[in-house]
Image: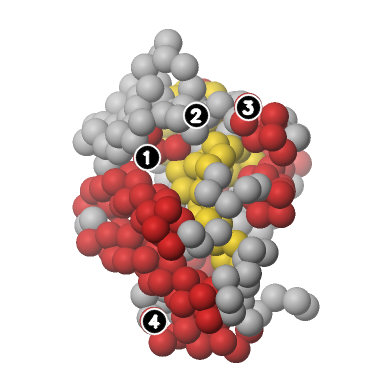
Amino acid sequence: KNIEFVHGNINDQNLVSKIFKDFGITHIINFAAESHVDRSINDPSIFLETNILGTYNLLDCFKRNWEINNKPKSWRFLHISTDEVFGSLKIDEKPFSEVSSYKPRSPYAASKASSDHLVRAWHNTYDIPTLITNCSNNYGPFQFPEKLIPLTITNIIRGKKIPVYGDGLNIRDWLFVGDHCSAIDIILQKAIPGSTYCIGGNNELTNIDLINQICILIDEYAQKLNINLSKNKSSNLISYVEDRPGHDKRYSINSEKLLNELNWKPKIKFKDGLKTTVKWYLTNFSWWEPIIKINNH
């Protein structure tokens, strides 16, 4: 009841300014971004427009209103970013941290790296109270069906192939959405302006191991929920496809700074979070089916 949804574009300066004025905005948490690497390779333009220019527009509007209101110390601009800005890790390399160098390797990662630099520049130049977080791969209920975990689940339900890039041995760290939200909440409330925090789930898995775990869970739950699947074993739908250009080998996040300074660590075990996620998609067809139909997945 305390949420008001405004359907608009962060590049619409008039709309953003009106929202600031109408609602007396003092805090921004900027999740707004194009985030799918495959689409950034096929058409980078929308990623540059949203992730870079959109972030600039929010920063500019925040700065103007912050200055008009005599630069309150309590205001915050929290920018949500990704570990992909740091590039790719080898199997034996240490996880990314807040001091890792920026080495983006895809149009998506480059656009997010650019937005991070804008936020830091606005803090250093204008002293606006900004914060940045770089998180690992998120998962959980309500995730858009183009992402790996919901794509795998919904493809199995619809009897479609599960595409696996290359050899399936690329590694990602997985962070449950609820844990990510709790980290953002504590950072927004307690972090010192100008700070950056890395948020990870401590759950490194190869893509193929993850997909096999999903297949096992769906085979188990579909029987209990009386959902008919096209295959006796969901893993029969796995299909290895040509690797995508510039596919990063491994991501891993060191969240020790967040633990040491703000006493945060992930609470959801991956096996429990994955079970919750699989069950949610198996029981919420009405949410994801229209999205897939509209987006022609």
Query: Which mark is drawn over residue 105?
Result: none
The residue positioned 70% from the left and 75% from the top of the image is 3
Report, in whole angstroms, how far the alpha carbon at label 2 lies from the one at label 3. 9 Å
Report, in whole angstroms, how far the alpha carbon at label 4 lies from the one at label 2. 34 Å
Per the image, label 2 sits on a secondary structure element best described as loop
Query: Which mark is drawn over residue 13?
Result: 4
Label 3 close to label 4 by CB (< 8 Å) = no
Q: Left or right: 106 with respect to 34?
A: left
Report, in whole angstroms, how far the alpha carbon at label 1 lies from the one at label 2. 11 Å
User: Could you say which quadrant of the image residue 207 lies in?
Assistant: top left
Q: Is residue 288 visible?
A: no
Label 1 close to label 2 by CB (< 8 Å) = no
**Residue carrying label 2:** 97
Identify residue type, mark 4: Gln
Report, in whole angstroms, how far the alpha carbon at label 3 lies from the one at label 4. 38 Å
Closer to the observer: label 1 or label 2? 2
Q: Left or right: 260 with respect to 20?
A: right
Identify residue type, mark 3: Glu
Per the image, label 4 sits on a secondary structure element best described as helix
Chain-order first, disc 3 or disc 1:
1
